[in-house]
Image: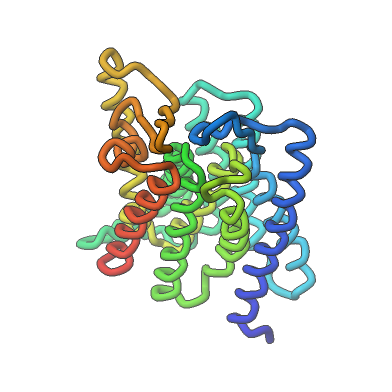
Amino acid sequence: MINIRYLMLFIFFLSLISTLILTKLFIYRAIKRNLVVKDMYKKGNQLIPHIGGLAILGGIIVSMIILQFVGINMIPLLLFYFVIILYAIYGLADDILSFNNRIIKVLVLFFFALPISILTSDTNLDLIFFNLELGLFYAFIFAPFYIMVVSHLINFHEGFNGLALGTTLIMFIFAIIKSYLLNGFTFIILAMPILGALSAFLYFNFYPAKILPGNIGTFLAGSSLGAFLVIANMELFGFIILIPHVINFLLWPIWVIKMDKYPYQKFGKLRKDGTIETPNYFTLKYAVCKIFRVKEGQATLICYGLTLFFCIIGLSFF
């Protein structure tokens, strides 16, 4: 019988080492093949590889292949990561083809999340003061919708080095702690491959980044977090830790309403002192830069702090 703690550590480090190696190789090959984009908030014309989520996906797949020989039940892991791989494929296609139709995006990603229904044994929704037993509605409507929303929130809260994946990693760590307090090790094995892969990739992605995750990376990370929260029955906890992401999303319609006064501008500008001049307050990262007049790395750390704050609240009270 394999000691569960040693198994968790083995899976984590297997994924971490695989992703470290693959990301290093990807950076080298991407630069050679000119698969690079401008790093917007650096002086000069610095070009770095993008769609680095391929390395994260590769690290997860390598760890899954090796795990087959360890003698554990692979079916839950394969089902869980099947959904995540579908989201990664969609993200890669979006990186290449730049999909614009938001309704199609919602429908496709909802459809891709449907296989998670196989793993949703508990269809009860805990809302603090009362519970709702949703039955098949939970499995085939609520759970896929939840995963789709979380993946979009993660994808939307990007734009600075290490922002999307760093905040996701923080939330994952707290989600794993919460899951352990509620259910022991029951669901944690599902999170170990993505936790190791995100930890390794963030080493290259944090400011100053050597590689960007692309939509493939953000949709992969977002879907894995959403799926884990659903399977571990921590939907309300998930909402609490995602409050900064929800605020970031809700600022968008305000921007749309005020678009005549604040025309759409995807990127801010770099001042001479290295701080970022943003066009408005209508994303969380822009608001941080407006309020504190900070550089990219500092803004990312402030956003980490906000996420950490709500993670502590979620862990303490929900």
Q: Would you say residue 6 is visible in this rendering?
A: yes
User: Quadrant of the image for the N terminus?
Assistant: bottom right
Name, please, the residue furthest toward the front: 272
Which color scheme is applied? rainbow
The one nearer the camera, 17 or 206, is: 206
Indicate whether 18 appears above or below 44: below
Name, please, the residue furthest toward the left: 129
The residue sitting at 70% across, 73% down in the picture is 72
User: Quadrant of the image for the C terminus?
Assistant: bottom left
Where does the image place residue 28, in percent across and percent down from the top left?
76, 44
Q: Quadrant of residue 17?
A: bottom right
The residue sitting at 69% across, 58% down in the picture is 20
Where does the image place residue 118, in percent across and percent down from the top left?
56, 55
Indicate whether 208 appears above or below 20: above
The answer to whether 306 appears left or right of 217 in the picture is: left
Indicate whether 286 appears above or below 2: above
Name, please, the residue furthest toward the top: 260
The residue sitting at 71% across, 32% down in the picture is 35
The answer to whether 111 appears left or right of 255 in the picture is: right
Indicate whether 243 appears above or below 93: below
Where does the image place residue 159, in percent across and percent down from the top left?
47, 37
